[in-house]
Amino acid sequence: MPSGKSSGKHSRQLLFSQAIAQLKAMAAQQTSSSPAPVSAESRTLDAYDRILQEITTDIACFSEKVTDLDQRLSTVEDHIGMLPEHDDELQSLWGKITDLEDRSRRDNVRFFGITEKREGTDIKQFLQSLLPKLTGLSFSPPLEFQRVRRIGPPRSISSGRPARSLRVSFSLSRLSRSS
């Protein structure tokens, strides 16, 4: 809490306390002439003093809560201020992810029309023997694949639907072509 507000609160408390002290002093002077009314006034002043203390305590409590809320609001505003920066960074990262996905797809070749189960148990070995026959090329060293798999759910040969395509990802760094 700023010191200006704090000193203002303390000066008000001091003024109230001084006013009550003066009223009590005046009541004490009146006691000698009429004791019954003064004691009633004294009790009233004591009641006002208690009420003033309760109000002062409540104000201090509310002041702490307002200070806490102000700090929390400031933190939220700081985070909101950083959102555009984070949004720009997120957009940049999405662009990079898209680029990497596109580059990854460039290394893939899809083959259609190879019937299901024709490859047997070793699909990579099957493709190493099939591709030189289809292309008329010999590959030395033999073709290497990073990944070979069928695309989509399994289909039975009797279903009448076309066979699933094969997606082949070559190890391009080791691929060499000779005629």
Image (spheres, rainbow, N blue to C red):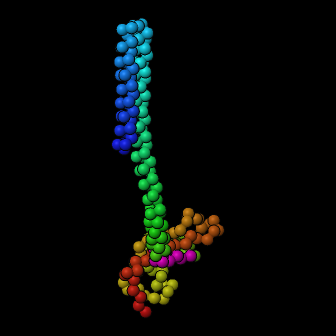
Front-most of residues 19 and 121: 19
- Residue 125's place in the image compared with 78, above or below, is below
**Picture quarter with the N terminus:** top left
> Residue 105, how many percent across, how many down?
48, 74
Q: How many marks?
A: 0
Residue occupying the point 61% across, 71% down: 162
- Residue 131's place in the image compared with 158, above or below, is below
Magenta stretch: give its range: 104-112
> Residue 27, how many percent across, how many down?
39, 15
> Residue 177, how many percent across, how many down?
41, 88
**Picture quarter with the C terminus:** bottom left
Q: Is residue 109 magenta?
A: yes
Outermost residue on the front side: it is 33
Q: Kindly indicate the quadrant of the structure image that contains residue 19.
A: top left
Residue occupying the point 45% across, 53% down: 77
The answer to whether residue 54 shows anywhere in this view is no
- Residue 49's place in the image compared with 178, above or below, is above
Front-most of residues 117 and 83: 83
Residue occupying the point 41% across, 75% down: 145
- Residue 179's place in the image compared with 109, above or below, is below
Residue occupying the point 44% across, 48% down: 73
Q: Is residue 72 magenta?
A: no
Q: Kindly indicate the quadrant of the structure image that contains residue 37.
A: top left
Q: Kindly indicate the quadrant of the structure image that contains residue 81.
A: bottom left
The answer to whether residue 47 shows anywhere in this view is yes
